[in-house]
Image (tube, helix red, strand yellow):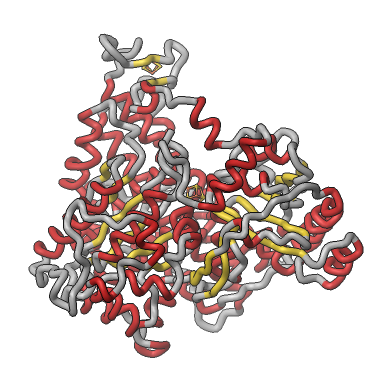
Amino acid sequence: MAERKTIDPAVIEILAKAEAEGISTAFKRAETTKPCPIGHEGNCCSNCFMGPCRLTGKTTVGVCGATKETVSARNLARHIAAGAAAHGDHGRNMAFTLLAVAQGKAPDYKIKDEKKLRKIARFLNVPVDGRTTEELALDVGTVALSEFGRQEGELLYVRRAPVKRQQIWRQLGITPRGVDREVVETMHRTNMGTDQDAEHLMLQSLRVALSDGWGGSMLATDISDALFGTLAPVATRSNFGILKENEVNISVHGHEPTLAEMLVVAVSDPELLDYAKSKGAEGINLMGMCCSGNELLVRHGIPIVGNLLQTDLAIATGAIELVVVDYQCIMQGLQSVAEHFHTKIVTTSPKVKITGATHVEFEDHNAYEIAKQIVRMAIDNYPNRKGAYIPDIVDHVVAGFSHEYIAYMQGGTYRESFRPLNDNIMNGRIRGAAGVVGCNNPRVTHDDPHIEIVKELIRNDVLVVTTGCNAIACAKQGLLTPEVMDYAGPGLREVCQVIGIPPVLHMGSCVDNSRILTVLTQCATEGGLGEDISDLPVAGVAPEWMSEKALCIGAYCVASGVHTIFGVGSPVGGSQEVTRLINEGWTEKVGAGLEFEPDWHKIVEKVLAHIDAKRRALKLEEYSPTRYVKSATYSPGDYLSFEEFKRGSYSRASL
Ligand code: SF4
Ligand code: MSK
């Protein structure tokens, strides 16, 4: 457990309240439940009942003879496959909803972005000309679903990657087939007595990860945009202060946007607003948590309560009437916190039930009625609220940057491109770019590595794109406001001001990391920065990762050519060989590696060194912090404290 639990003042307040009231939180449990030192490093195998085998001390092989390398590689492969399965199942649900809309079986939804639907259709080889929206949606939904079960050939979306990248995948034999096939094959190959060569297992890990990045996740993102609208910037607020004392507070948590979209409509329903008033509330306040929250934030500007480690604490305010969840990242501990208060947890996915929670199954064909039922439950619960405490802490947010919008900002409707961005990377105003994404983990100080890394990168003229819980951390700490421009290095600041984008771009939820792949492809094919994603001066970072989905995202970023660094610790740290295979080994094969580095200072140094090395390889101007006006004063070991950063002591005057 980290010495300091969090940097978020709102979390500090509610954590103290929870502790005083004897409420068990993830922070508390992380103190008492130490990570198993053997499993933590990937040295425990439980793949058959001759074990579990703990490869530690003098025990270097399992009962079957499996070595540390095999065990470690198998464990990592299974984690990545689980992540791909989670995102893939989400993508499949989106395809089912699209199909239901096309067939008139989901009357409460309509296609909001026909242009995007046509774009997806072209990628999926669906004829576009002269067809109605419903015809297109029917075919797109059908082909998308078949991509999950594709047995042979290649996922259609891989053709969206730069040609050189596609060739690398083909040469290595890792071009993904169907999403389901890659997940099943990974589970098969890691079954006892099957694939036993660590390098071979690691190649399959890249393949299954690619089936997520260029398959399940990309389809989830695209279809969500077609159904609910493609992102464009919105302004909103974040953190516990968005809870309202005199209103019915409803929070949406999980990952799918489907029900959340209906709740947005239901909370403005005059009948329900009157009903809320009849119970003494002044209104209905809808908020988001985690990635369902991100989906609502980036599309509708619905405020966001917080990221993963705030989900139980939000309930501990005592001010939430109802938390509605679908799937992924919903800690079971939420229910026990809810039992201390009047809060109801409502599960909605047929795949997820939580003992003690109320289940209201969500169905596309009856979406609005179900959303209204859930809102009514929350309103009925409002008179039961007692002794709530809402910290008065709120930050402002500008979010919602799709790759379409970023291209639009660089040339308008008729001349959209990535030329200005590429040119400014080439001339050194922008040193490079980084995707900083991923979860929270109570093994490190909550939000600290997220925020420190992002602010140091923009200070060093590195453009940052963000998703998931990192995006929420940035939202809460003022990093997604126009004011943050003052803290960006002058080169980056100038470009952002001219283009009209902030230096930290919130691109959505975890599945929306696929948007980053599209941006990178557009940069690589725009010209001037090589021919492939691995040529670009970019890197990926997951400072506080915890989820198998994060590992999968990391692996598909690497397979796509982005060198990626994870914080916290390494799940393969027990095997030097697997540690080598995923870094140097993958770099030789796909031009990028995966590293685990617990020290965020070192992550910043590694990202900057990597970006500079890529610039040199492209024979670009060497980045100079003093070339444009006077840029960041960074040198290794020179870091701003967060307090200094927030106070603005690093200002233009001090440059
Ligand atoms: Fe042990 Fe081998 Fe069984 Fe794993 S597969 S639990 S290493 S015997
Ligand atoms: S919600 S996967 S904790 S980013 Fe997507 Fe946050 Fe990680 Fe879940």
**Nearest to the observer: residue 510 or residue 629:** 629
The quarter of the image holding the N terminus is: top left
The quarter of the image holding the C terminus is: bottom left
Give the percent coordinates (x, y) of residue 108.
Answer: 74, 68
For the point 27% across and 44% down, the residue is 594
Which quadrant of the structure image shows residue 653?
A: bottom left
Q: Is residue 420 left or right of residue 504?
A: left
Asked if 445 appears above or below 96 in the picture, the reply is above
Give the percent coordinates (x, y) of residue 467.
Answer: 44, 59
Q: Which residue reaches farthest right? A: 278
**Nearest to the observer: residue 271 or residue 221:** 271
For the point 41% across and 36% down, the residue is 3
Give the percent coordinates (x, y) of residue 254.
Answer: 60, 50
| Camera sees residue 644 | yes
Asked if 593 appears above or below 518 in the picture, the reply is above
For the point 15% across and 61% down, the residue is 612
| Camera sees residue 255 | no
* Count of residue discs: 0
Give the percent coordinates (x, y) of residue 178.
Answer: 44, 49
Q: Is residue 352 left or right of residue 531?
A: right
Q: Which residue reaches farthest bottom? A: 414
Which quadrant of the structure image shows residue 157?
A: bottom left
**Nearest to the observer: residue 607 or residue 207:** 607
Q: Is residue 228 left or right of residue 263?
A: left
For the point 37% across and 35% down, the residue is 77
Asked if 430 appears above or below 533 in the picture, the reply is below
